[in-house]
Amino acid sequence: MNDFAETLGLGGVADQIGLEPWILLLLLILLIVILLIIIIILLLKGKKAIRIYALEKLHEVDPGEIAEFQITVQNQCKQKPNGKNRLIIGLERIGDLPSGWKAEMNKGSFDLDGGESGELKLTVKTSPSASMDEWANITVKATPQEKPKKAAAVATITMIKEHKPDLVITNVTHAPVSFKGGDVVTTSATVENNGDAPAENIAVVFYVDGEERGRLGNLNLVPGAKAKVKFPWKAGEGENHINMKVEGV
């Protein structure tokens, strides 16, 4: 063993501390084994007995509508004979609700053997008069009776959906298609509201080379509506860069 220790370069170190090389080698091996044992113990202690999760943790709904969260609780212990790793898992709903909101779960507990999972549904009903600044942060906590320190939790958020217009300008054409400086040109386009809220009192502004050359205002577009706009203008010398934008949104 001395030869092996010498091969590892421990001879010089052993001489400095007054030990035989093979004794130093054994001490190092013992130290490594102790460190591995400590790491294994820490990993076992850190392992969660249960897991709780939701694939969707955020829902946006209209006032008066219901948000539903599908939540899974899993016993992460290994299955053993005679249900030695069976857990009775209590469920708790934590979090305040805005006035007029309600929340409930369809399960109060689970009885799960090692490796088994259970599904529960958290339902959050919003108030018909809920405003945009109202929201609910509801946490579902799962606590195994046998191992209360191994509790786990998942947080959910329910918000009121914001409705807004989404205006786009499409189908831009010019008549005539080809033109030169001094020609009178008519540029046409379509304004579409692809959002889920009305656009009121909007204006479409027409620019040539960065200069405003036309404006069409007082337009109202409900969701899904389209409006055709036309701008006659006189072409100048040069490139005539054209741009349009919507104001008032």
Image: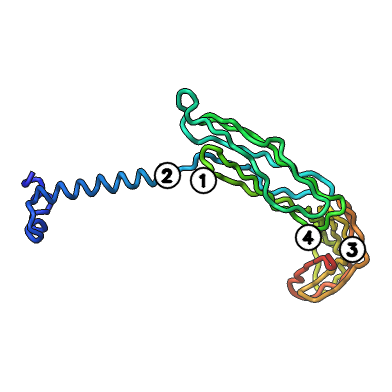
Q: Which residue is mark 2?
A: 45
Label 3 with label 2: CB-CB less than 8 Å: no
Element carrying mark 2: helix
Which amino acid type is shown beneath numbered disc 2?
Answer: Lys
Foreground label between 4 and 3: 4
Q: Residues within 10 Å of mark 4 (few under 14, many from 20)?
A: few
Alpha carbon of mark 3 to alpha carbon of mark 2: how far? 72 Å
Q: CA gap, disc 4 to disc 1? A: 36 Å
At mark 4, the secondary structure is: loop
Give me the C-alpha separation between circle 2 and circle 4.
42 Å
Q: Which residue is mark 4?
A: 133
Q: Crowding near pointer 3: few (<14 within 10 Å), some, many (20+)? A: some
* Left or right relative to 187: residue 42: left
> Callout 1: helix, strand or loop?
helix
On the question of residue 247 being in view, the answer is yes
> Nearer the N terminus, badge 3 or badge 2?
2
**Label 3 belongs to which residue?**
230
Q: Nearer the viewer, residue 225 or 234?
A: 225
- Residue 94, labelled with which disc? none
The amino acid on which the numbered mark 3 sits, given as a three-letter code, is Lys
Q: CA distance from mark 1 to mark 2?
A: 11 Å
Q: Position of residue 192 (x, y in %)?
A: 84, 55
- Rendered residue at 71%/39% (across/down): 105
Label 2: few (<14), some (14–19) or many (≥20) C-alpha neighbours in 10 Å:
few
CA separation, marks 3 and 1? 70 Å
Residue wearing tag 1:
149
Q: Label 1 near label 4: C-beta < 8 Å?
A: no
Foreground: 157 or 195? 157
Q: Earlier in the sequence, mark 2 or mark 4?
A: 2
